[in-house]
Each structure stands twice: as structure tokens, then as C-alpha cells.
Image: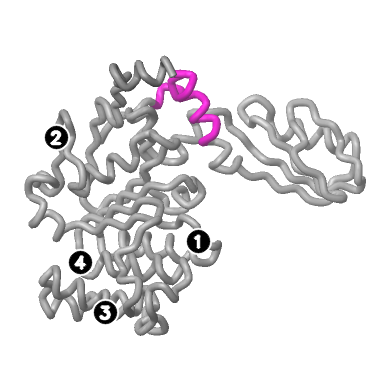
Amino acid sequence: MRETFRELVKPTVKTVEALKGVSLRIGRGEMVAYAGPNGAGKSTTIKLLSGLMVPDRGRVRVFGMDPAADRVSYVRNIAVVFGQRTELWWDHSIAASFRWKKSTWDIPDETYDRMLGLLTEQFDLGPIWKSLARELSLGQRMRADLALALLHDPELILLDEPTLGLDVIAREKMLDWIKHINAEHKRTVLITSHAMTDLEKLDARIVMVHNGSIRFDGGFEELRSTVADGRILTVTTDTVDAPELEGASLTRSEGRRHEYAFDASQVPVVRLLDALAERCRIEDIQTASAPIDEVVSQVYRRMNDGAPLSGAEATSR
């Protein structure tokens, strides 16, 4: 009770800097993946770029405009999609939501007709056009939400966890649509996600933020090079017992199929294969880079320890 009373009389105030010293430039038509652990500052960045928040210090400019001060004219050039929210009218048809946006945003007939035709074909809206939003599956709702966000033909598309909760097929389609929008329509895309596999499939520039600061800015291959050269060796042998290999860790064994993890910068794969050949007969071999999630886990651990990423600290573009 004493502590409670003290907090009421003189509450403890803690200042949290969501973003600090961030300098980032994105070119027109670029695809940028924006990643980082929970609380890193990703959503804050999206809110600043969409004009929902105003920075305490520094400046945000998109197309030469201040997202907050020039809000009315600015929002006509952007689209924002949050994976956990919807712009669709819950108890109305998809068609009604599109007509509502055309009227509210005063979208010209020519733009509306042109974009509606493209979006209906691209996102397969025909079968769900007259369905109520609440009747849609998550995958159907997400593609309708993305199509609705693009209805006014924006130049900048901000996507916050757009694949959240989607099944494998729906997620693959969503990623294909995002790549198509960027490649074919030359739209600038900034996407956040915790699914690093999804981001790597987009073949985008990746910017990683941690504790409000940018720690990496480059390509996925460059990101992989900042940590150990993790590889996966999968072999099928003539024995059920997995041979022990110096320099490699057995991660999984199913029947005569065995999977090992190793650092290729320290242990050449030829050495492992020679060691295997001495112990058993090899029937099949496969090698692959370590999953990007494992790479990012190592990156996050180094960030938490305050260690540099092998000289690949952020260089803003």
C-alpha cells in the first residue's frame, strides 16, 4: 500500500524513445522490407509515414510533403494496410465498400473504372464481390482489403503484417500480388513482417531496426554474410543410425535420412562427405543455406548484445 500511495502522489515517469537517430531514404519504385523484434519501432515508422503520428524531433517527407501537415493531399498518394484491421464495412458487401470509397475519396470515374477492372482481375474479386465482409475467410478479406487500399491508384503502399494469419496458399498469393504491384506498376512498397521467409521471397532491400535505431540496411545475401555461413546437409545413407560428424550437429533423423547443421566458413562440406563415406554408403545428398529465420535469430542475439554486424551496420540510402 505504501508503494501504491507513493506512485499516486509522485508517479514514476519513464521516457521511451520509439525511434531515435533514424535516417532513411527510400527511392521511388523501390521495395523495402522493414524488420525487427517486437517494440523495435516498425509500427511507429508506419504511423509516421502515414501521418497518424507526428515526430517529436526530426522531419518526415514523402513526395516532398509533410504527411501530417499536408494530410488531405498526401493521403491521396498512399495506401495503408494493417494485417489486423480492415477498412471494409463489416455488414455490407465488398461492392458497397468500394462504392463508399469512390464517393468519400471523390475518385474520378476514369480512375475508378480502370482500377476496379485491374483489381478485380488481379485479386479475383468476382466470386466475393457481393459477399458481406463478415462472411469472408481471412485470406479473402486480406485480398479485398489490399484491393480497396489500391483503388485510388496510390504511389506509395505501406503494408504492416499483411500476411499475418494467412495459410500457405493465401500467403503465397499475397506475396505474388505485392511483387506484381511493385514490378509491373512501379509502386513504392514498404512492408513490415515477422515472417522473414516471406520478406526474403520478395527479393527486397531489407532495413532492420532495433531499439528504435537502424542496425542494418542492405540485401538478404548481405544480411546472411553478417553471421556464420550456416548450412544444412541432408544425406540418405544405408544405415538407420546417424553417423557422428565432427564440426556438424545432427538436427533431425528419419529412417535413413539424416540432417546436419554446420558452419561452411569453418567446415568444408567436402570434409563432412569424406567423413560420411568412411562410415557408411551415401545414397543421396542435399545442401542448402540455413533458413532465414535462424539467420535473423543470430542477428537479433547480436543486436541484444550490442555487437556490430560484421561491419555491416546501417548505411542509409
Which residue is the site of mark 1?
166
Task: Name the quadrant of the N terminus.
Answer: top left
Q: Decide: few, some or many residues near mark 3? Use Cα within 10 Å; few <14, some 14-19, many ≥20.
A: some
Residue topped by disc 3: 96
Q: What residue is shown at x 22% (from left), y 55% (from top)?
A: 156
Number of numbered discs visible in the structure rendering: 4
Q: Secondary structure at mark 1?
A: loop
Magenta span covers which residues?
296-312
Marks 4 and 3, Cα distance to the nearest angstrom?
A: 19 Å
Seen from the viewer's position, the closer of residues 9 and 66 is 9
Q: Decide which of tag 1 and tag 3 comes sooner along the chain.
A: 3
Crowd band around label 2 with a 10 angstrom C-alpha radius: few (<14), some (14–19), many (20+): few
Q: Earlier in the sequence, mark 4 or mark 3?
A: 3
The C terminus is located in which quarter? top left
Specify which label sits upstream in the sequence, 2 or 4: 2
Residue 145 placement, left or right of 48: right
Q: Nearer the viewer, residue 270 or 224?
A: 224
- In the picture of the structure, the residue carrying the numbered disc 2 is 59
Residue 40 image offset from top left, x and y in percent: 38, 33
- Does 123 lie within the magenta span? no
Residue 305 belongs to magenta span: yes
CA gap, disc 4 and disc 1: 25 Å
Q: Which residue is mark 4?
A: 153
Q: Are marks 1 and 3 in contact (CB under 8 Å)?
A: no
Q: Is residue 256 left or right of residue 97?
A: right
Query: Counting residues from the N terminus, which is met first, the one under dot 4 or under dot 1?
Result: 4
Label 1 and label 3: CA atoms lie apart by: 24 Å
